[in-house]
Image: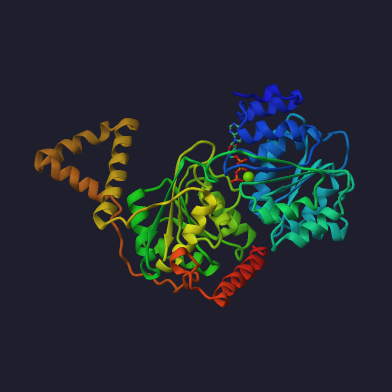
Amino acid sequence: MVKFQDFQLSPSILKSLKRIGFEETTPIQEQSLPFSLAGRDIIGQAQTGTGKTAAFGIPMVERTDARVKAPQGLVIAPTRELAIQVSEELHKIGYDKKVQVLAVYGGQDIQRQIRALKKQPAIIVGTPGRLLDHMNRKTVDLSRIRIVVLDEADEMLNMGFIEDIEAILEKLPAERQTLLFSATMPERIRQTALRFMKNPEFIKIRSKEMTVPQIDQYFVKVEEKDKFDALTRFLDYHSPDLAIVFGRTKRRVDELSEALSIRGYTAEGIHGDLSQAKRLSVLRKFKEGNIDVLVATDVAARGLDISGVTHVYNFDIPQDPESYVHRIGRTGRAGNSGMAVTFVAPREMGYLREVEKTTGRRMRRIDVPSLKEAIEGQQRLAMEKIHAAISENDLSLYREAAEELLSESDPVAVVSAALKLLTKEPDRTPVKLSFERPLPAKRTAKNRKTSVKQKEAVNGQKYFRRKTAGKR
Ligand SMILES: Nc1ncnc2c1ncn2[C@@H]1O[C@H](COP(=O)(O)OP(=O)(O)OP(=O)(O)O)[C@@H](O)[C@H]1O
Ligand SMILES: [Mg+2]
């Protein structure tokens, strides 16, 4: 058991960590801190939800000098929501050291950001586009940056972002420290990364699987047209506390959240075409539990740390294995357990096997729950509500009415009626979803005859998707 006290950290940082409730290090923190605190460049790879933010946040706060009136630390993150979240965590770690942290991201009033940047915060967390915007306007001074972090590094060095990242890194002082973190790090991206680093230490937390063991992973084979009814069956049967449903496109997300609402679920969607205010308000409602189901594109796949997410449903199978790892990693965080169910159209089995090959873990096949199971799931929920009401409430005002009911009818009939009223029965209101073509078949052992042309089509599409992915 390694504690933060075992490292050479400033007393003010130890005090902040204690306030946050961090005492023991996670493996990535334990293994990377000796190098990062010594000023070394690092490529750090560790599973989702295992504390990579603090692994780079601690050395970053440690290396900033609150007396120097200039930004000294820079974190670049792929989405606005993640930039905000990371800035909040850095603020907590730097609280007792009085380190100022500012998030700059698109969709927020730029004048306001310019005013905040004038105060010379010690640490800036930003999305690439907005950072470049400030650099071009000369409203940010990066000449004193001593440490830069690419969070979700493989995504940042991929096609959608690489040019922006290069443009930003070029302008930073050469003698800076560079840290890269992600749960995934494909070899070709690692090669790209080396271009920006000085003799980096590669720290990979050794584990058999790329995903955390406490996420139960399942797949269900289902035709495109049957997917929505299958999803509602699962939601009824599992009755998740908080669930995220991932869809492939923005249109898909809009239609799914609409359709779920029609069937009585509290669901809302999040994707890159919504206003920033809307994105943030949806996310806030989800965190507070005012929405049970968040429907999202991959914009919510990486880095977001929302406690209480018990289930992830891949309504559409992700196109590449890395995306799968990050999506399901929204559950099972910080040692909690979770469940992930991936919907696979029959011709998409090749993608599933590819995911399994990358993660090193097999998904178990399950069937769509029956109507009976779906009702049972909701009944269980109603029963839990009754149990909770018994233990948490003063029911004395209800006793007389209860006794009256029981004297008039069969007790089992009374309770059955009460349960029925409390149970959300499966709803089959017809809904309309646009047909979304399953991914093109992948070459698998069984399917070796796929032509080169078809393979190129797959790759071409992948490239295209990646390119547009940058504009989320
Ligand atoms: N040393 C620690 N002790 C207890 N909890 C921790 C510790 N370090 C981090 N956590 C908590 O673990 C959760 C996950 O951390 P974090 O978001 O940094 O994970 P991550 O590795 O960056 O995941 P992802 O790959 O999804 O971005 C957070 O809620 C964080 O507060
Ligand atoms: Mg993270």
- Could you tell whether 55 is left or right of 328 in the image? right
Residue 270 x, y percent position in the rendering: 55, 59
**Occupied quadrant, residue 49:** top right
Of residue 319 and residue 98, the one placed in the foreground of this image is 319
Q: Is residue 366 above or below residue 204?
A: below
Residue 121 x, y percent position in the rendering: 81, 43
Q: Is residue 290 above or below residue 253?
A: above
Residue 57 x, y percent position in the rendering: 71, 38
Q: Is residue 32 above or below residue 305?
A: above
In percent of the image, x 57 and y 44: which residue is there?
48
Of residue 162 and residue 81, the one placed in the foreground of this image is 162
Quadrant of the rendering where the N terminus is positioned: top right
Q: Is residue 340 above or below residue 269?
A: above
**Quadrant of the image where one finds ligand 2:** top right
Of residue 167 and residue 184, the one placed in the foreground of this image is 184
**Occupied quadrant, residue 398:** top left
